[in-house]
Every structure is written in C-alpha cells, then in structure tokens.
Amino acid sequence: MTTINFENQVVIVTGAGGGLGRAYALELARRGAAVVVNDLGGNVEGGSGSSAMATQVVAEIRQQGGRAIASCDSVSTEAGAKAIVDTALETFGRLDAVINNAGNMRLSSLAEGCAEDLQSLLAVHLFGSYFVTRAAWPVMQRQQYGRVLFTASSAGLFGNQGQGFYGTAKAAVFGLMNTFAIEGESQGILCNAILPFASSRMTEHAMQGMDEEYLKRTMPVFASLKNSTQPEFTAGLATYLVSNVCRSTHGLYSSCGGRMARAFVGVTRGWQGSREVAPDAETIAEHFAEITALDTEGFSVPQSPSDELKQVLMAKS
Ligand code: NAD
C-alpha cells in the first residue's frame, strides 16, 4: 500500500475552524503538511467573525507536533483570498494544495427566499472558491504542480428541501471545478470536487429547514449511519485528492456514510435523429422514452462540449 505523506508540502484549508475543514486540517498536519487553517469564525449564516475557531485548531495541531498558522480572512473577497495565499507563502514559503471548504448556509424555499440570501451564499461558496483558487493559481503554474479540491454538495447536484439557494451556489462550484480542471491539467494542477456528508453545525442548522414528515423519514437513516457521519470519515478522501499520488482531475467524488463513490454528470445513449432534417416536437414526443431511458451501458461522461460532440459523431445514426 502506498504511504501518503505531505512532508515539505503546504496546504490551505478554508473554513477549517470546525466540522469537515478541521478534520482535514488535522489529518493533513498529522501527515506532515504545514497547514494554513483559515476560518472567518462567524455564525453558520456567514455573519460576524472571530479568530477563536482558527486559532483553536492551530493550537490542536501544534499540540500534536504539527505545523500550522491561523488565517481569519474571508474567502469571499479578492483581498481576503490574496491574504490567505500570502499567509501560506510568507509563513511557509510555498503552496502545494488548496481545499476550498469554507461555507455558509441560509435556509428558505426558493419561492420565499430573498436575493440577499442567494448573494450571501454565492459570495462564500462560488466567489470564495474562485477567489482563493485564482490567487493560488499563478503559484501553482510557476511550480507546474498543484492540487485543488472544491466542495460541492448533493443538495446542489440533486436538489434538497429548504436549500435551493445553497444548492444553486454548490452546483456553481461544480461548474467552476470543471473548467479549472481543464485549464490546469497541462500544468500539473489537478482539480476535483467532493460531495461530503457529515454531522456538523451546518447539518444541524439544515435540519431546521426540513418539514416534519421529511425529518421523520430522514432521522432514522441518519441515526443508523452512526459514526460514519463524523467528519473524519471524509478526511481520507479529501487527503487523497490533494496528495501527490492522486492522478484524478475533473472528478466529482461522494463520501456518504462510509461509502466513497464517483458521481458524474453523464449523457445517455439517447435517440439519434436525422442529421439532415431537424426533428419537430411531435417526433421528440414519439421518441421521448428513448431520450429519457437510463441505459446504464450506453451512457457517457463527456469531459467537454467538444468531447460530447465527438461521441455523437462516432455513434451510428
Ligand atoms: P461548518 O459550518 O462546520 O464549516 C464551514 C466553515 O466555514 C465554518 O467554520 C465557517 O466559519 C467557515 N466560513 C464561513 N464563511 C467563511 C468565509 N467567508 N471565509 C472563511 N471561512 C468561512 O460546516 P461543514 O459541514 O463542516 O461544511 C464544510 C463544507 O462542506 C461547506 O462548504 C459545506 O457547504 C460543505 N458540505 C457539507 C456537507 C455536510 O454534510 N456537512 C454536505 C455537503 C457540503
């Protein structure tokens, strides 16, 4: 079995003051990484801030003999993101990997929520992931090496009650990863995204957005997953994906109740119409069952729009 270590490597973990980020930071430090423990230290909705959360995790890492520095800058501004990257470079002299994990949560149905909620979620999840990655990018380009892990969510990829705005921001993070992965691959910068599932203050808060019927169905499932919902159960996957043995890029991975799996957006075999005559709505209706069918053998996972076009051209008409 390959041993994975982070000796002489520097990793930024955003939102590492608690929950999943804290588990990642502790695990990376245990394996030799010098870690920038970034956390705004605010409430779950993203308001206010304090240095207590980040400094507490740094103290834990140092107590265990590891190397870490606290950063309390917000990921959601360009200046904050630059300061986080500068902290890594000024304190430890290099930067090898970034885990974009910081996140906030605001609950409401899409019908009742307000634009300010959506903006607040986009600011942390989407702009935060973009700003921090953008600030780290030139460093990684210069050294022709880097690992970036983005945090998406099944609430975005599949949808979830009370989390429409949150899910929208998380789905956008998946979009961001797709193209950073394409732009980074030839320069040794590998980008992936994770769909975690873990008990944290955020999941406790999210429960408040569920109706009673949903909770009745969900709580027993949650309880039966027992320990495997602890953040530590996701730390192994996150650690692997930002390590120098990882070769995956442009991937989306789910960690849920101890099961690790690839998730993907794919295209079914579908129905191939004429390449000369445009199909009308009636023809679509006629073939809709074929268009919709989840043919588990015929699907493909395009890596770009041109990849999808190539696959269509290669299919028999
Ligand atoms: P958490 O609330 O414990 O962690 C999020 C951390 O991000 C907090 O410590 C918070 O202070 C920090 N943060 C918020 N805004 C910030 C900002 N502007 N700058 C810097 N730090 C900021 O929740 P968690 O469950 O550990 O979530 C970690 C990540 O995983 C989040 O992106 C979340 O959306 C995502 N996620 C979690 C789950 C889950 O099941 N827990 C599922 C899917 C996705």
Image (cartoon, rainbow, N blue to C red):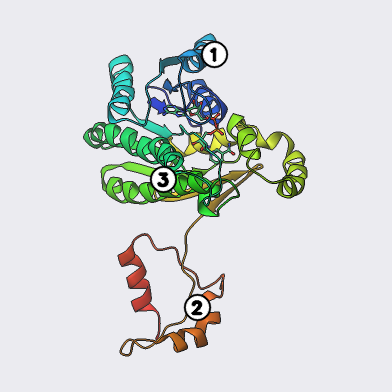
Point out residue 217 in the picture as x, y percentages from the top left corner. Answer: 75, 49
The Cα–Cα distance between marks 1 and 2, rounded to whole angstroms, is 54 Å
Badge 2 density bin: few <14, some 14–19, many ≥20, Cα 10 Å: some
Label 3 sits on a secondary structure element that is helix
The residue sitting at 58% across, 50% down in the picture is: 160
Label 2 sits on a secondary structure element that is helix
Above or below, comparing residue 302 to residue 61 in the picture: below
Residue designated by label 3 = 173
What numbered label is drawn on residue 291?
2
Point out residue 95 in the picture as x, y percentages from the top left corner. Answer: 32, 27
Q: Amino acid at mark 1?
A: Glu
- Comparing 215 with 299, the one in front is 215
The residue sitting at 66% across, 42% down in the picture is: 257
Point out residue 96 in the picture as x, y percentages from the top left corner. Answer: 34, 30
Label 1 sits on a secondary structure element that is helix
Badge 1 density bin: few <14, some 14–19, many ≥20, Cα 10 Å: some
- Comparing 125 with 251, the one in front is 125
For the residues carrying marks 3 and 1, which lies nearer the camera in this image? 3
Q: Is residue 298 left or right of residue 192?
A: right
